[in-house]
Amino acid sequence: MRQNKKSSFEPTTIMLAASSKCPAECKYCFAPAGMEDMSLDILERAVTFIKTLLGDQKRFRINFHGGEPMMAGIGWYRKALPLLRAAFGARVRLCIQSNLWLLNQEWLNLFNEYGVGISTSLDGPESICDGQRGAGYFANTMRGIALIRANGQDVPVIATIGKSAANAKDCREIYDFFNSRRLHFAVHGAIPSISRGVTEETLPPGGMLVVLKSMAEEYFRDTRAISINMIDTMIRALYYQRPSLCSFSNCLGSFLAVSADGKLYPCQRFCGVSPYAIGDLAENPDQANIIHSGGYKLLADTRQEIALSCLESGCKHFPYCNGGCCYAAIAARAHKTVLHGRDPFCAAYRGFFDALEVRLTAEMQDSMIGAGAAMPLLSITQGARYMPRAHP
């Protein structure tokens, strides 16, 4: 059994690497070091390319990435944002993933004027976060979060868990930190980098299961008003039997990244990894050029290999897992952190899906007989945040 290769390239998410520069020193960073901002000429070429690629009707998302995208400077955004709004109007959702160190009211006013959604990265309490991301990271990012909240807005957070924090105690502290501050967060494991290799904080394959189970234990029993994106999407994927997160999707063709130098990649994680380039704006590529590029073919072949490996393993979760993240699998292969050639967290995801299935099945049975037990997983499948009674 083989997955069908996609014959079209119509991304729903486009990532613009506004700057490859970054002031942080995250120990697990996967991005190649860079000191380049995207020029307005490259941005204008990108706009022309996107118009041709997607036509006039498709709704899509543009996410400013990096490096640290705000390093491009507020002057760049004063020109970029009106250009993008004029070109695509309301059919494009504009977002930025930033550490928020440079954020002030002037920046926030500009983002609000053009409807830019803001998300950030923070790994939990200061000792854990700065231990992974460098001294001062926590204070600088929390300052930005406080400013956004003072303006009546919320900010989703990505928490990356490295090797040193992959234990039940630290995971509880991380959960308690976000819960006490009512910050919704996503959980990512620190993966190897294709270009930089394995770092001291690269999460071992089995560590992700510890993280997910430890977080879930707190998440399902606590009175809360937050969501953990990774856990919620895994529950919904299991219930509806379809993926709802890029890490578990056959994502080839759904994402496009434009690096600061104008090269095109299938995902922001691949920026700067030349074998996986799928085009260059300087060469005026079209859809056919991308699909027949060396990088696209290489990724398509890798995706096929992962699919076959999953199916041969007999994993019942493949329809909504797809073997995990393709970048993570390629990085793990390059640095030999796993032998099966799939996402290094494959076994962890499988184990967590198994545990969720047992619990979800029990909740469904309780629901049918009208039992009064708490049903956090069923609540999440319906899009609601589970709010059990407070502990006595």
Image: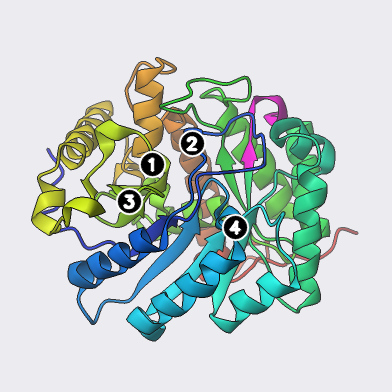
7 relative to 134 in the view: left or right = left
Residue 374 forms part of the magenta stretch: no
Report the magenta residues as a range. Answer: 160-167
Element type at marker 4? helix
Q: Mark 4 and mark 1 in contact (Cβ < 8 Å)? A: no
Numbered mark located on residue 70 in the image: 4
Q: Quadrant of the rendered structure where residue 390 is?
A: bottom right
Residue under pointer 1: 271
How far apart marks 2 and 1 lie (CA) works out to: 7 Å
Q: Nearer the viewer, mark 3 or mark 1?
A: 3
Question: The disc labelled 2 sits on which kind of residue?
Answer: Ala
Residue under pointer 3: 262
Within 10 Å of disc 2 (Cα), the crowding (few <14, some 14-19, many 20+) is: some
Q: Nearer the viewer, residue 242 or 306?
A: 306
Residue under pointer 2: 31
Going from N to C along the chain, the mark reached first, 2 or 1, is 2
Residue 392 shows in this picture: yes
